[in-house]
Image (cartoon, rainbow, N blue to C red):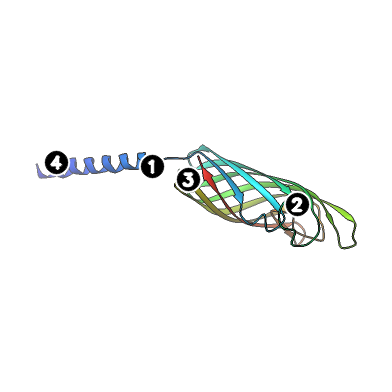
Amino acid sequence: MKKIKYFLLFLFLTTLLQAQQDIKPVYKNTVKTTFLSYITGSSKLTYERAIFPGQSFEITGGIIGVGYDKLKINSKGGLFRAAYKFMFSQSLNGSYIKPEYAFSAFYFDSKNAEKTHSNMQTIMCNIGYQQIIKRFVSEGFLGAGVGWGNHTELNYHHGYIDCYGLLTLSFGMRVGFAF
């Protein structure tokens, strides 16, 4: 009889805990901006949508030339990124691995004072962490991959760096909100 009481108490408590977890809102969408992009001469906006539990798709669009031009090269153009996230949790919270495609095209003033065109693409693998507190989203990531296209003297393509020929490196911090 005592074992039955403990078993029923255990069932009651687990049901109560499960009910409390179900009350917590689960967001399926986020809109984020890349925190450091304004300092590096571009503005980026990212939309993320949960597709399956623990998986999401995100797209990023950006305008190159909106923000602080630290290098004084007067760059103008655009960028696009698309990624598929594999989360280590069943929600948009937590660590993830993210294969990503990125493209940037822009004109800038080169060292010899003429307009130069940059057109680069890369396929990268990023690791990162994303946290949602209430509706506020914060995210940090870093990654590496293979790039091709029109390499320039800058080596910076507003979202990733190309170095040593084909190697590309990326890192970033994003903030936004979930809904």
- Quick one: SS at disc 1? loop
Question: Could you classify mark 2 by the number of other residues whose Cα lies within 10 Å: few (under 14), some (14-19), or many (20 or more)?
Answer: many
Above or below: residue 71 compared with residue 6: below
For marks 2 and 1 on the same chain, the one whose residue lies earlier in the sequence: 1
In the picture, the disc for residue 24 is 1
Along the horizontal axis of the image, is 92 left or right of 103? left
Question: From mark 2 to mark 3, how far is it between C-alphas?
Answer: 30 Å
Q: Which residue is label 4 attached to?
A: 4
Q: Nearer the viewer, mark 2 or mark 4?
A: 2
For marks 4 and 1 on the same chain, the one whose residue lies earlier in the sequence: 4
Along the horizontal axis of the image, is 118 left or right of 139? right
Query: What residue is rendered at 26% in x and 41% in y?
Result: 16
Query: What residue is rendered at 62% in x and 47% in y?
Result: 99
- Quick one: SS at disc 3? loop
Question: From mark 2 to mark 4, how far is it between C-alphas?
Answer: 70 Å
Query: What residue is rendered at 59% in x and 48% in y?
Result: 98
For marks 2 and 3 on the same chain, the one whose residue lies earlier in the sequence: 2
**x, y percent for residue 80:** 70, 44
Q: Quadrant of residue 163?
A: bottom right
Question: From mark 2 to mark 1, how far is it between C-alphas?
Answer: 40 Å
Amino acid at the residue labelled 1? Lys
Q: Which residue is label 2 attached to?
A: 65
- Circles 4 and 1, Cβ within 8 Å, touching? The answer is no
